Amino acid sequence: MHMQLIRNIAQENGIKAGRMSKVNLVRAIQRTEGNLECFATDVDGTCDQTECLWRDDCTASAKKAKAS
């Protein structure tokens, strides 16, 4: 998902994105929505949240973080 769309979602949730990284911004959105702040933490590929809006980006970000 493009950062501009993520920023728009953040704004709709009353979050000021500023210079937040993608990971921190998505986690702030998750927290505000009352969800688990788990974006980019699924390094084992075991996430069971199949309906999550962030799922595709989450797994890609987790793999990237693991490789670093």
Image (cartoon, rainbow, N blue to C red):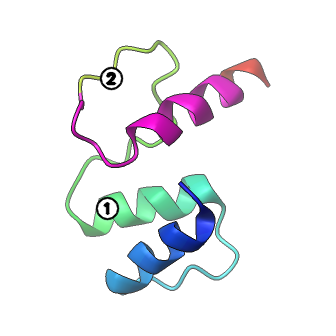
Q: Residue at x 61, y 58 (%)?
A: 22
Amino acid on which the number 2 mark rests in the picture: Cys
Image check: 44 left or right of 50?
Answer: right
2 vs 1, front mark: 2
Q: Quadrant of residue 11?
A: bottom left
Label 1 secondary element: helix
- Dot 1 crowding, Cα within 10 Å, few <14, some 14–19, many 20+: few
Q: Are marks 2 and 1 in contact (CB under 8 Å)?
A: no
Q: Label 2: how many residues lie within 10 Å, few (<14), some (14-19) or many (20+)? A: some
- Tag of residue 31: 1
* Residue at 66% in and 61% down: 21
Choose top left, top right, bottom left or bottom right for residue 18.
Answer: bottom right
Residue type, numbered disc 1: Arg
Q: Tag 2, which secondary structure?
A: loop
Name the spot of residue 25 as percent of width and height, x first: 52, 64
Q: Which residues are magenta?
A: 49-65
Depicted 67 relative to depicted 31: above or below: above
Residue 49 found in image quarter = top left
The disc label shown at residue 47, or none: 2
Image spot of residue 20 (x, y percent): 64, 69
The residue at 20%/60% (across/down) is: 34
Drawn side of residue 3 relative to residue 52, left or right: right
- Look at the image and say whether residue 50 sits in the magenta stretch: yes
